[in-house]
Image: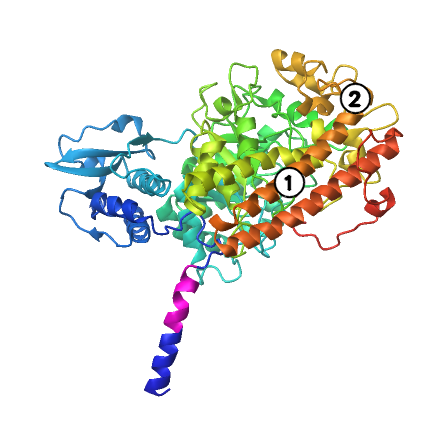
Amino acid sequence: MNDRFRSLVLALCLALLPAWALAEDGHELWLRYRPLTGAAQARLLAEAREVVPLAAPSPTLQAAVQELRRGIAGLAGREPALTSRLRAGALVLVTRSQAPPGLALPWAELGAEGYVLRRVRLRGQVVTVIAANGDLGLLYGSFAWLRAVQTGAHPAHVDTQSAPRIGLRLLNHWDNLDRHVERGYAGASLWDWWKLPDILDPRYVDYARANASLGLNGAVLNNVNAKADSLTALFIAKAAALAAVFRPYGVRVYLSARFSAPVELGGLPTADPLAPAVQAWWQAKADELYRAIPDFGGFLVKANSEGQPGPQDYGRSHADGANMLAQALAPHGGVVLWRAFVYAADASDRAGQAFAEFQPLDGRFAPNVIVQVKNGPIDFQPREPFHPLFGAMPRTPLALELQITKEYLGFSTHLVHLGPLFQEVLRADTGQGGTVARVVDGTLHGQRLTAIAGVANTGTDRNWCGSHFDQANWYAFGRLAWDPDLEARAVASDWVAQTFTARPATRDAIVQLMLASREAVVDYMTPLGLHHLMATGHHHGPGPWVDDLARADWNPTYFHRAGRDGIGFDRTATGSNAVVQYAPPVAQRWADPRTTPPELLLWFHHLPWGHRMPSGRTLWAELIARYDRGVATVEDMARRWQALKPDVDAERHADVAAYLAVQLREARWWRDACIAYFQSVSGLPLPAGTRPPGLDLAAYKALHFGFAPGR
Ligand code: BDP
């Protein structure tokens, strides 16, 4: 290449660089650090001239310092120097053990992970401190300080103290070893198992940064429908490589364990948890794991559920199985997260089965076992009542499992913000003296071990989650895992400020759109407590007519029970009576249609089509009104988004608009197909003024989606 050509190429690259560097493709998540406005930049520079670490050097401290420098460089346009001299306007990272005398802070309240952000006078200088008992607290504090600045706080007035309320804050990846993600709608698995441990994708660091920025401290790497292979030496080495990348960010690695691994890998004739050879196999496996990953978190187990092996195969209980694994992990400080998502083939009401199997085992689990319970008794529906196990197992630590990936809520093409759903379950009153949040954070029953899990929505898509707004669901889960009492609205508002804009009018408009989206999806898919009306297998689109699957409780008709006489699942004394699994004050309210909120009506009751609703409409008319409301809300969301065009960068605006168009089309499809079907069963005319479905029922039934993602 001659010199002239070289400089031409260089000039061309430089000309292209800014556009590329600022591509609004969502890749930077909420850690974008775009320049603040002029005045805000000046304020920031005055308060964060330098970064001064007063803490023992460590990779975690280094990560905190790097993040602060990167963030401030982006926000203020100048990277602060890293020094050891304390001057006015410094940002000081300080641990208790290295704190200068006289720095009085509420250290004892911070625990191992909490932090304080405060302006103080230190050695005669006015500085901002990010203070914590250890380096991980400093990292969390650094992210919190950056968040405060990004969301519009004056850097001189940031004054916060925070410590996580739940101990284990985990993402559960349903990622297979071939990189297919079960219920994943954002591309392939982030973990490139084949190239690990040698090749480390730079995304692993960004993944860990993103989690640390929210306070998430663990990742279960592989699918709960686990292959034994994940426990081979080959895969342990791969998991160890990921653990090494995540470690500075406080993210521990866990694995889903297949209960029959001693048979499949160890060649034993049995996986009976009471067999000494089986116990020895797991003990050796645990020892091997901890040699490779000294801070390995533990096992997540799906046992005797949907065909997975488990202790019941040998006539043993869930407690026998969990305790055996717990014993193997205990010497190393690991935990077992044993899932309560089980349903037998024979029982009459799937909603009651987890309770029936697990509640009697309360008090029989080893101290390092946590029973992991889905938010509701069926399966991550747009709306469910809280799971009756919450509050009913006072002697067992219970983890709350939420689904961040939107298996039943329109995949990643529908804008559905899950903050309100998460908040709804956390704030549900168990009737046992506290909310679900108080069960999960351990305060209600004095649990020491506490955990919360979110089924991840991450993948190799450039924007990580399949759509811009799906990032907000990862974000909301992380923030609520740290503090389950946060307001969903406030969390959404922070995300918008960090991701789109902190300008109040635009920010509020986007937040409003997000908050409306959850009720919209309930309305256009499963209003009034209906559930599991989705098409078979992939769960994409409506399939309320499906009645021919191998198991009764896989069929939508099993769940809605619509006929000439009415609609809904009777879970009261005249039906399955699953309602009595709730504490008396809750059970009494939900056993009576007059005191059951309309949102849960058909979950608990089978009612005639002519049943009078609080609105004055008949149930039939109300059902249609809800479907219409759902579609109208999506229309409104699309309109509101259009109006935001001048305020949002063109790239993301166009992207979201295209997704909203898909959502609107599919919301109408849901409405039309469900109304067409329910009308065919009720035999009733559509209420006056109702727009009839666009097609015949047969046309909706004929739709098939052979290659829908996530199966
Ligand atoms: C259901 C999913 C299935 C999961 C199962 C589980 O359809 O893919 O394996 O839950 O949680 O929601 O184990």
Residue at (45, 56) in percent of width and height: 203
**Part of the protein shown in magenta:** 13-22
The CA distance from mark 1 to mark 2 is: 24 Å
Secondary structure mostly taken by the magenta-highlighted segment of the chain? helix
**x and y, in percent, of residue 428 in the image:** 56, 22
**x and y, in percent, of residue 508 in the image:** 47, 37
Q: Between 239 and 531, which is closer to the camera in this rendering? A: 531
For residue 466, say whether it is visible: no
Residue 128: which numbered mark, if any? none
**x and y, in percent, of residue 108 in the image:** 27, 26
Q: Quadrant of residue 144?
A: top left
Say whether marks 1 and 2 touch (CB < 8 Å). no
For disc 1, the neighbor class at 10 Å (few under 14, some 14 to 19, many from 20) is: many
For disc 2, the neighbor class at 10 Å (few under 14, some 14 to 19, many from 20) is: some
Determine if the magenta segment contains residue 20: yes
First in sequence: mark 1 vs mark 2: 2
Read off the residue under disc 2.
618
Q: Between 38 and 593, which is closer to the camera in this rendering? A: 38
Residue at (44, 62) in percent of width and height: 198
